[in-house]
Image (spheres, rainbow, N blue to C red):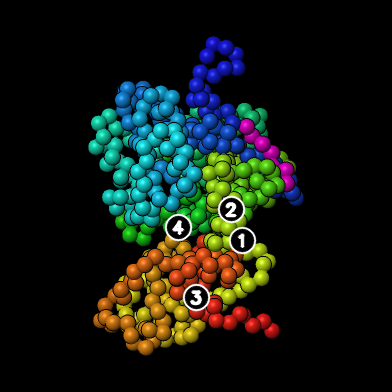
Amino acid sequence: MSHDGVQGSVLDLVGNTPLVRLRRLTAGLAAQVLVKLEYLNPGGSVKDRAALEMVRAAEAAGLLRPGSTIVEGTSGNTGTGLAQAAAVLGYRCLVVLPNTVAVEKVDVLRAYGAEIVQTRSNLPREHPEHVMNLATRLAAERPGGWLAHQYDNPANPAAHRRTTGPEIWAQTGGRVTHLVSGIGTGGTITGTGAYLKEVSGGRVTVVGADPATSVYHGGDGSPFLVEAAGHYRHPDTAADVWPLSYDPAVVDRIEAIPDRESVLTTRRLAAEEGILVGGSSGLAVAAALRTARGLGADATVVAILPDSGRAYLSKYHSTDWLRRTGFLDGDRPDLLAERIPDRAVVTVTPDTTLRAATELAAEVGDAQPVLPVVLAGRSPRFPTAGSEILGALDVPRLRAGLVPGDPDAAITVPPGAPVTVGTGETVAEALARTAGADVLHVLRDGRLAGVLTRASLTARPLQRS
Ligand code: PMP
């Protein structure tokens, strides 16, 4: 600690991340776009800042003592920041995660010595197993348990007001004109944005980057594939609680970014700028590029890049994953993309009556082999997210009157997990990967774009004229 160049612990390395100018993605733009590389924090993400600030505030308030357990519900990075701080400062750490979090992130938490509890994702906010309800319960049950609660903890935005904002102001010599950030808990955009507005006398414009279906800008709340940013809302959620860490008054404008744009921007950052980051960084840069398009050479747009791409090598940076979810089609022969009709899939919801389903089946006729059953309460503006397909009703059986039940009662959702494939897979790849499945739900951009039967794919190759 007393030697120049030697840090007392890794916690002294949190913050002070570099700002780098984009060179290729900005071709043709007059404005500068600078990115803040938060993956260079010692725990690998922007959440090191909030985690350390929350722990220090809890210590100061006497809420953390030797032997205490830090508990949090998180999609991963806050858990890492907390587990890192716990390892250095001598606390235990228990992290509650949704089961959709990338496996690499879970392994990282285990390596830091954290205890992991996984729960289902896509649950209504009131469900007892919802990440935050489970974390709250476990923190209360455990002697010496302390819930960090990043969603409502004022130390979360305070970390960014104290560190991220002043860093950006100093690094740009006060020339920053626009701040672009994703919104998860809202801590980053709220703290950084509030500081930059204050110090600039209101000159800095704050732009939120939000997945196209996130509710923060009025999306329908259905799932999106960019992890850790945006706000998902289950249709059965009664009261949609927004985090207190997010102050919408700080945000001047929100750019709604489709997953495809976020994912493709994420890949370009690695391939063209040498910046390997996660999907929420691609989201932020996509929004920053949109913002920069309308601006002149005197504008300096700063985007926050929350974490590294290493945690997502099996997702956004995997060609296989991109094909299976329909983000990447390529020009290979016999793709599923060529086999699906160019019109929206007709779906039913669990409250559809058998009579209505039978009438729909008659309408679709031979054009669709099944009627997918999807979650109710979503906007028809967006095709159903792959993870919200609940099952499928057989159209020929419905038409033949072979589905038993009271015509005026709701349909029975057939058991068994629906099988999904992507527009970027070849017919042969999809068939090999889904042996035993009779019905394949085809995703484009992670959302339902068509349904095909195994029989129709194995029967005859597509005739091209
Ligand atoms: N991206 C990633 C990868 C994150 O981990 C987070 C934090 N959960 C965010 C974006 C959003 O940051 P914030 O919670 O400060 O809004």
Residue 270 % position (x, y): 65, 46
Which numbered disc, 4 or 3, marks the residue closer to the eye? 3
Label 3 crowding class (10 Å Cα cut-off): few <14, some 14-19, many 20+?
A: some
* 144 sits left or right of 364 in the view: left
Question: Separation of disc 4 and disc 1 at Cα?
Answer: 19 Å
Question: Separation of disc 1 and disc 3 at Cα?
Answer: 22 Å
Which numbered disc, 2 or 1, marks the residue closer to the eye? 2
* Picture quadrant where residue 93 is located: top left
Residue at the (54%, 40%) spot, across then down: 306
Label 2 crowding class (10 Å Cα cut-off): few <14, some 14-19, many 20+?
A: few
* 330 sits left or right of 390 in the view: right
Q: Is residue 329 magenta?
A: no
Residue for badge 3: 454
- Report whether residue 388 is seen: yes
- The residue segment tinted magenta is 18-24
Q: Amino acid at mark 3?
A: Arg
